[in-house]
Amino acid sequence: MQRILGQDRAISVLRSALQSRRMHHAWLFSGPRGVGKHMTAVELARILLDPEAQPNLAGEIEADPNSPTSREIDAGTHPDLHLLHKELALESDNPELRRRKLMNIPLDLLRERMLGGMSGTRHYEAAAYRTAIRNHGKVFIIDEAELLDQYSQNALLKTLEEPPAETYIILITNRLERLLPTIRSRCQLVRFTPLDDVAMAAWMDRAALDMPPKQRTWIQAFAEGSPGIALLAVEYNLYHWHETMQPLFDELNRNRFPVSMGETMAGLIDEFAATWVKRNKNASKDAANKDGARLMLSMLASHARRQLALACERGESVDQWTTLAELLRNAETQLHSNVNLKMLLENLAVQWHTNCETLAAG
């Protein structure tokens, strides 16, 4: 786990468990998106599944990155490492699963990939209870665990309570509150945090991202300690979003309403979603639209925080930016309630402008 940057506390918890030889069977990795939860889960699985893993010179148990186990994991072919995510529904034999929008992880998918039982017209063996093919344990990593629906979470409880021997379950989430208290109580919680400025700068140097200094500065600020978000910003050119939206922000600051603001945001999100689906063959356009909307709201929030900091430095009123933060929180709630996206964005622009006018008049 030496490759993980900026998560010393989380890694320390896991190393202590490994060295104690009393590894808990169920783990819950919680923290912001893109800060290393999934990478850490895979690195932990590498150690748990590799019979050759042993202490290094510092006494920390590590797996040889060139061992047969590591090579299989890197190739995605290790038979005892099971990665579960919503897109697997598209590979199901159950036509109902294949047709559904990929907005959650339904019970049938969990039955097919882990728990066993009926999905459609077929009965699936419980992968969690099978003997490990390599005879050295099994690891199940459930990404975006907050997307497990209520039935899936309840069905998972029995396995968490009575796990098969040498079977490890790792749930990854950035919305801990969406998991049932009974799920949370049966797992060892490990909290991940945003990388600090030093770790984030080190990560960006390691990633060798080729971009002008101005763009790098914006991306590092926008990512707020998340390498995953920084990569996404580079890959999908979110700096272009910043350049497109800045003139509209300037109009609002002059108490002028940018009529095209809602439509512009919707257009950028649609372009992002279309590109996402094109690059990821199993992706859902609806899910990609929601993801793009979250990124847009994050960009607006990042802008608000920068302006808030500047207002504090200048001794100016911060009311506009604190109110905008509240508007963005409301928009995030509406997004999760499946409000029409274009209407949500247009309403946000109108409320933002109305707020600016009210504060200017006062």
Image (cartoon, helix red, strand yellow):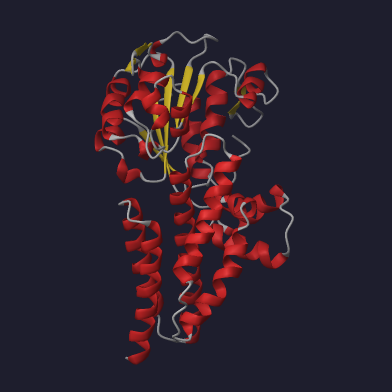
Can residue 195 be seen from the camera position used here?
A: no
Q: Position of residue 39 (x, y in %)?
A: 56, 36
Image quadrant containing the N terminus:
top right
Q: Nearer the viewer, residue 356 or 209?
A: 356
Seen at 56% across and 35% down, the residue is 281
Quarter-of-image position of residue 170: top left
Q: Nearer the viewer, residue 213 or 277?
A: 277
Q: Position of residue 18 (x, y in %)?
A: 49, 26
Q: Position of residue 72 (x, y in %)?
A: 63, 20
Q: How many marks?
A: 0
Q: Is residue 299 above or below residue 290?
A: below
Seen at 51% across and 32% down, the residue is 41
Query: From the viewer's perspective, is 141 left or right of 203?
Result: left
Seen at 54% across and 15% down, the residue is 79
Q: Nearer the viewer, residue 194 or 327?
A: 327
Seen at 44% across and 67% down, the residue is 262
Can residue 191 be seen from the camera position used here?
A: yes
Q: Nearer the viewer, residue 318 or 100?
A: 100
Image quadrant containing the C terminus:
bottom left
Query: From the viewer's perspective, is 64 left or right of 189?
Result: right
